[in-house]
Amino acid sequence: MKQIEKAEKLMVNQKSKISPVAPVLPPFESREDRIGRYFKKYLKNFVFDEFSPSYLQRVIKVKFMAGVPIPMRKEDLEAFCGGEGLKVLHIAENMAWIMGIDPKFKYVPQYVEYMNESFNYKILEGLIKLGRDAAEEKDLDRATIYFRAALILKPDYIHAMHSYARACMEQYMNSNDEEFIGRFKAEAHEYYELLTEVHPRLADAYYFLGYSYLNMGLYQKAAFTWQEFLRKSKNGKDKKEIRQRLEQLKQPIEIEKGCNSVMAGRWSEGIQILEPYLDTNFKSWWPLSYYLGVAYARIGKINTAFSSFKRALSINPSHAESMLELADLYKISKDKENERKYRKKAELILGEQETGKEEGQKEEIQK
């Protein structure tokens, strides 16, 4: 089910001064926050105070802010003095920071209401400009925070969606941390997909989504997406680049087709498609050897399957599925020692992966 279809089951944002047309996507803050953990450190830059009762009596339209903590940088405290000393725009920018850092912060609904009372859609343009300026200065955290704040105010705002996806992509391309890369990559991918659904005429979304599919090894999806880009784009240089990419994808698409045949249980068909690529540069792709091994094993070519799985492990030594397949083959061969050896290795790797997931979940709960 696509994201938009899922949105129908969730509360959809209402129209407002900032968003005269009700957004078609659910509130940004209702999503799983994959990357918020990396921004929590910026909360230490803020302290909180409240609007004074006298100020709230004078400015009746924000009376709902009574008792709501107002974020300020430490240097703002002296000027704040109940609200008169700080410009509304400055207060809103501080609120944007808190929203972008933690969309699930308790007072985000009040901050959104405050901004809707104080501004119109131009506040979105301001946040996007601040974010893009930060991105140009290579301050990707600041950029990402501004874009997240804009998405809270209007979750289907095309410039916020596009800029957020680009910022997330830049974030993971500049990191060596595997978990960090995985979280930002998933976020970027989701927003490029959403862009093609919500704003289907935006050619750039298909351009970047194609590369995202390519990085995931989904070559057929990359090709379909890029073909859509070619239909929508008027950028000659980019179209030339993508035509070259599509030409390069012809063989990977065939390999993917062969792997899909194996996964569907069409063993002989998969072997027929995949075997010729063992005499090409694609021999170094571990999935080629793994899926051939699965197909060989299922049709009883045990020795050939052994060779395929070992070749897959020589390329990708931590591939637990190849180890488990080898263990099963050793069991058939009644080689208990090697069966135990490979099964134990696989269990250790899978256990480490599960532990990593549990630690990540605990960290989210604690935060």
Image (cartoon, rainbow, N blue to C red):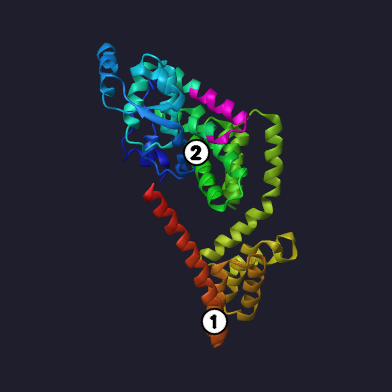
- In the image, is 34 to the left or to the right of 55? right
Instruction: Look at the magenta stretch and give its main secondary structure.
Output: helix
User: Amino acid under label 1?
Assistant: Glu
Report the residue at 64% width, 56% height from top: 254
Report the residue at 44% width, 33% height from top: 100
Does 42 appear above or below 94?
A: below
Residues 213 and 144: in front is 144
Q: Which residue is mark 1?
A: 339
- Residue 96 picture location, percent across and down: 43, 28
- In the image, is 99 to the left or to the right of 160? left
Which stretch did the figure color magenta? Answer: 127-141
- Residue 97 picture location, percent across and down: 45, 30
- What SS does tag 1 mark? helix
Q: Mark 1: give few (<14), some (14-19) or many (20+) Cα within 10 Å.
A: many
Residue 297 is inside the magenta segment: no
User: Amino acid under label 2?
Assistant: Tyr
- What SS does tag 2 mark? helix
Q: Which residue is mark 2?
A: 191
Residues 263 and 9: in front is 9
- Residue 241 picture location, percent across and down: 70, 38
Outermost residue on the front side: it is 78
